[in-house]
Each structure stands twice: as C-alpha cells, then as structure tokens.
Amino acid sequence: MNAMLILAVACALAAVGAVAFALRERVRAATAVARMEALEAQGELLRAQLTQSATSVAQEILRQNEEAQRNREQLAQARLEAQLKPVADTLQKFQEQVAQVEKQRAEDSGGLKAQIQQLLQASTATQEEARKLSAALRRGAGVQGRWGEQTLRNVLEAAGLSARYDFEEQASTDTEEGRRRPDVTVRLPGGGVFVIDAKCSLNAFLELQEALDDQARDAAGLRHVASVKGHINGLSAKAYWDQFDASPDFVAMFVPLDSALAAALDRAPELMNEAMDRRVVIVTPTTLFALCKAVAYGWRVEEQAANAQKIAELGKELYKRIAVMGEHAGSVGKALSAAVERYNRFVGSLETQVLTQARRFEDLKVDHQGKEIAELPHVELGVRPLSKLTDEPAPNVRLAAGGKGD
C-alpha cells in the first residue's frame, strides 16, 4: 500500500512537474512568440526606416545628380554660347548687311523703274518726233533739202568750222554748162576748197522703214539703192572739182542719216567703191565730222604758223627797242658817273679851299648862332653797268652817297 501511495505521489509529482514544465514551456513559447512579434515589429519598423532612408538617399542622390546634370548643361550651354557668339555676331552683321542691301536694291529698283519709265517716255517722244519728221520729209524734196542742209551745217559747226570764214553755203559759180550752186564749199588751208552736196533723196529709205512685209521691204531697198546710185552719177557728172582752183578731185555726197547709208550698203556693198571710182566720197554725219575735224586742225596749224611768224617779227622789233633802251641806260650811267666825279671834285675843292677858312671863324669865337658847317661825304657807290647788252667790258663806275657799297 505504501508502494502504491508512493507511486501515486510520484505520479502526482511527475504530473505536477509535467504541468509545470508544460506551463513553463508555454510561457517560454509565449515569450518567444511575443519576442518574435516584437522582433517582427522592429523588423518592420527597421524596414520602414531603411526604406524611408533609402528613398531619401535616392532622392538626394537623384537631386544631386539632377543638379549636377543641370550645372553641366548650363556650363555646356555657356561654353556653346561663348563659342557660337562670334558666329552669332557675324550672322547679325550679315543679316544687317542683307537688310541694307535689300533696302538699297529696293531703292535702286524704284529708281530703275523711274528711269525705265523716263526712258519709255523719251522713246515714245522720240518715236513721235520721228513720225513727225518722217511725215515732214514726205511733204516734198524742198523739206528734205532744207533738213539735210541744216544737218550739214550743224555737223560743220560741231567740228569747229565757222560759217562765212571756213565754209560758204550756196556759193554760185559760172561754168560752161551753166551756173552751179553747190550746197557747201569748205575752205582748206593753203587756199583750196572742196564741195559738199546735201541733196540725197530719202523717200525710198522712208518707205523701207515703214514696209510691213519682206517683199515691200526688198522693193523699197532696191529703190533706195537706185536713188543713191543715181545721185552719185549726177554729182560725178557735175565735176565740181574742175570749177575751183586748188580743189581735190572729189565731191562729198552728204547722207544725213547713217542708217540710210547702211541700208544701201547692205543691198549694194560695192556702192562705196563705185562712188570713189566716180570721184564721189559718200559721207554721213559721223564721217563728215571726222573729215571736218581734220580741216579745222589744218586751219589751226596754219594759224599757229602765221602767229609764229608774227611772234618772230615782234621779237625782232622788241629786241631793237630793248637795244635802244640799253643805249639810253648806258648814257644815263655815264652821265651819272660824270656827275659823281664832278660832285666829288666839288666836295674836295670845298673842303680844302673854303671850309678850312670858314672854320677859322670858330677859332676866333665868332657867334655863328648854333649853326655848324656840315661835312660833305664823298660818293663811293658805283653805277651798275648793263653788261648783257654789249660784249665790251663794263666800265668800273661808282655812284652813291653816304657810305661804302658795291
């Protein structure tokens, strides 16, 4: 029975120990769980703190990176602007120059338009005047003749020739064939003359200018050539060069329009040679101007030669008169030298013969009322001779008063 009690007590004790152990283990487990929960809470807090710190650090790093990137971009921008500033200045200047050029071009364009407008107006006025001239020239041969004579007169005066002195208009001459009256006779140096005729007809040329088709133009051109050839033959037959003494063996046929002669030469290139074979020289305002310029130059050379002769004669006369004046000047010099010599002799005689006696009154204390006898100087300056007027040696004459000199 005791064994049972002991066993029961032992079992009870074992049970109590087991319950205590279980309680202790449960408490330990609860403590461990609580600790685990605390650790988990701390871990969560730590993770939150770490996450917040990492976020802050990342944000700070990102901010710093962004700021550094922004600084680098600003620095790069500043460097780029510094490098591109000369280019920008050049582009600015280029833009200003382009604007100025554009402004100048606009002004020039406006001025050019105005000039073109004026040119068009002048061209229109010229065409109108040309039509009036063409209509006036068609009224008759008299109108054409007067116009040709006036044009011829203008060319002669422009070349430097003077009417009534260097050329004469409508001068009549009597010949075996009757009275001849050339339009102009030009006087040449040395007494010669040559004749200019201004009666070339321009009717066919005017028709040529107004022709509307090739056939009408060709027909008018042939008539113009025939008219010019007919006038050449007529002038050659008059033989003006035989009617004047010392005249070159040709007559000048004046065509008042260069274009009229060009139109004839286009259809008859041999026209000039044929005219010269007949002693007719075809001239236009251009060629006649050059010819008359040569005549004016000849007159000027002849006038200079005549003036040179007159100058030589005047020089001879002037030399004679200068020689006479030199002789007079020499006579005056000789007279002056003689007067000086006589003056010096007079002064010497006065000092030795008279003044010495007069000064004795001063020794005798004679009252001379403060007046003293002045000394008379000798004249020692020489008269300059005219040595250039004579080959003889110049005399050494002296003339002057009151001192020494050359």
Image: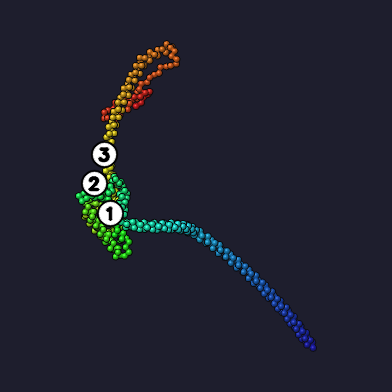
> In what element is the residue under mark 2?
loop
Q: Residue furthest right?
A: 1
The quadrant in which residue 390 appears is: top left
Q: Nearer the viewer, mark 2 or mark 1?
A: 1
The picture places residue 325, in percent across and down from the top left corner, at: 30, 29
Residues at marks 2 and 1, CA–CA distance in whole angstroms: 23 Å
Q: Position of residue 289 (x, y in %)?
A: 30, 51
Mark nearer the N terminus (3 vs 1): 1
Above or below, 318 against 354 in this view is below
Percent coordinates x, y for residue 222 in the rendering: 26, 61
**Labels 3 and 1 touching (C-beta < 8 A):** no
Label 3 amino acid?
Gln
User: Is 324 rendered above or below residue 45?
Assistant: above
Label 3 close to label 2 by CB (< 8 Å): no
Question: How far, Cα to Cα, is label 3 from label 2?
Answer: 22 Å
Q: Quadrant of residue 48?
A: bottom right
Q: Which mark is residue 309?
A: 3
Please rate how many residues cluster around mark 1, counting C-alpha atoms within 10 Å: few if below 14, some from 14 to 19, many from 20.
Answer: many
- Quick one: label 2 or label 1, which is nearer the N terminus? 2
- Which residue is disc 1 drawn over? 199
Dot 3 falls on a residue whose secondary structure is: helix
Circle nearer the N terminus (3, 2)? 2
Q: Residue at x 32, y 58 (%)?
A: 138
**On-image quarter of the C terminus:** top left
**CA gap, disc 3 to disc 1?**
42 Å
* Three-letter code, disc 2: Gly
Which structural element holds mark 1?
Answer: loop
Q: Residues within 10 Å of mark 2 (few under 14, many from 20)?
A: some
